[in-house]
Image (tube, rainbow, N blue to C red):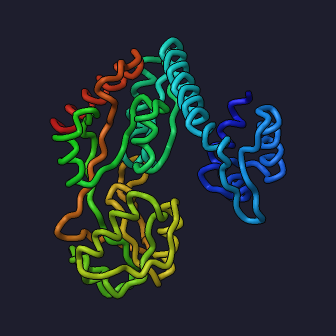
Amino acid sequence: MNTAYLKEFTVLAEVKNFWEASERLYLNQSTLSKHIKLMETELGVPLFTRTTRRVELTRYGEALLPYAQSIIRAEFEYSTLLMQIQNSEKGTLSLGTIPSMPQYNITGLLSAFQKRYPNASVKITEDDPKNLFRLLLNGKCELIFTRETKLSFEKNFMEDTSVVRIPYIHDHLIALLPKKHRLADSPSLALRELKDESFCFVKEDSLMYDICVSACQAAGFIPEITFTSHRIDSILDMVSAGSHAALLMDRHLLPPDKAPYAGDLPWVSVDITPHICSQVSLCYLKEQRLSVSAQNFVALCRQMCIQNRTD
């Protein structure tokens, strides 16, 4: 039996709707329906009872479901192991990272790694911190650069012994304001002073979005969020238009050469006090045997971290 059909069967069993299942699987409904009928023909039993809007598992479908899930899980685990072995033999490092790599000097570290180990190759996946740990745990990435809040980092550093965390860079929250804003000349401000603003935030369902919303709630107000984007330049444009404020990390505003923006800018950045900090760390699974490329990358990262602290 085609294992892809088993995957489709388990998704349909979960959502109980052909349209929703086809959307999740990136198939059209007729193709999904055809595959399910092929399974039923091969098994000689109906797997679902169908109505106009929903489907329900039959007794035969309920009996098949745990076996289908087990087969899919086994196939995934083997595929992941196979990929890890292939990457190890090829010297390929699979690295997950937060966006804004230049601002966090991750591209600089990668450049130094490539110069030192020219035969190594790096496969990079950019994603939100909420997803990066999942990529690490399921073997899609051998190493990840991820962000955690200061409190969660300190807690996880002490208690989460399954993950090795190498502190790399920390940053803090700032307010981004139109140049003519009433608070634009402030050396710093309390977040509550912005309670009446319309905000631009990094996209919903991201760690940055959660950090900003939680910070506002801790300051005693619910932020009015009228624009979200995964692009920092789009947020800068909205603030430049003069009708929005934004909350970002201070390193988001560093251009690739790490020099501050220069010139007559239509916005200003103001520190928020007390500081709301986050920690960016290089992480890997403690019990996982790292490839040679990953070991070399970790060693270089530790070396650069030591140099940065002594500079």
Residue at (26, 36) in percent of width and height = 165
Residue farthest top in this picture: 89
Placement of 283 over or under 297, stated as above or below: below
Residue at (59, 29) in percent of width and height = 71
Q: 153 and 236: which one is in front?
A: 153
Question: Residue 216: x and y, percent?
Answer: 29, 75
Q: 157 and 36: which one is in front?
A: 36
Give the image quarter of residue 264.
bottom left
Residue farthest front in this picture: 59
Placement of 211 over or under 309, stated as above or below: below
Q: Quadrant of the C terminus?
A: top left
Question: Residue 276: x and y, percent?
Answer: 23, 63
Residue at (76, 48) in percent of width and height = 27
Question: Residue 146: x and y, percent?
Answer: 36, 44
Q: Quadrant of the N terminus?
A: top right
Residue at (42, 82) in percent of width and height = 198
On the question of residue 296 being in view, the answer is no
Direction from residue 128 to residue 31 in the image, left or right = right
Placement of 279 over or under 205, stated as above or below: above
Q: 50 and 157: which one is in front?
A: 50
Q: How many marks?
A: 0
Question: Residue 50: x and y, percent?
Answer: 76, 57
On the question of residue 164 being in view, the answer is yes
